[in-house]
Image (spheres, rainbow, N blue to C red):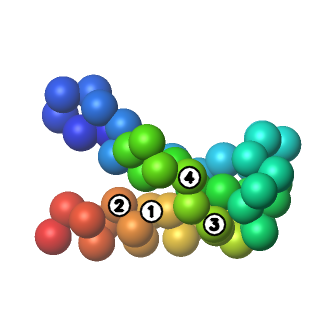
Amino acid sequence: MDKNQAMIFRYDNAPRHAEVSTFPHHKHEGDDIKESPEIILYQALLEIAQRQR
């Protein structure tokens, strides 16, 4: 989330969005739903660090 508490991105594995090829794994970026393989915490933390640079 950004400083205004708006979501930047989140990874999700809830069984929704069956149209995504990586179902049930997917990523929310704003209003977009994107394909995403299953990730581990370290990968999410790296993405956060890269976005802060």
- Give the residue pinned by disc 3: 35
C-alpha span from label 4 to label 2 = 18 Å
- Give the residue pinned by disc 1: 45
- Horizontal side of residue 3 vs 49, given as left or right: left
**Front residue (pair 50, 31):** 31
Dot 1 amino acid type: Leu
- Horizontal side of residue 2 vs 39, given as left or right: left
Q: Which mark is residue 48?
A: 2
Dot 3 amino acid type: Glu
Specify few, some or many for label 1: CA neighbours under 10 Å numbering under 14, 14-19, or 20 or more: few
Q: Which mark is residue 33?
A: 4
C-alpha span from label 2 to label 1 = 5 Å
Specify few, some or many for label 4: CA neighbours under 10 Å numbering under 14, 14-19, or 20 or more: some
- Looking at the rendered image, the disc whose residue lies closer to the viewer, 1 or 3, is 3
Name the residue at 78% across, 41% down.
16
- Looking at the rendered image, the disc whose residue lies closer to the viewer, 2 or 3, is 3
Asked if the residues shown at circle 2 and circle 1 are in contact, with their CB atoms under 8 angstroms apart, the answer is: yes
- Looking at the rendered image, the disc whose residue lies closer to the viewer, 4 or 2, is 4
Q: Position of residue 37 (x, y in %)?
A: 70, 71
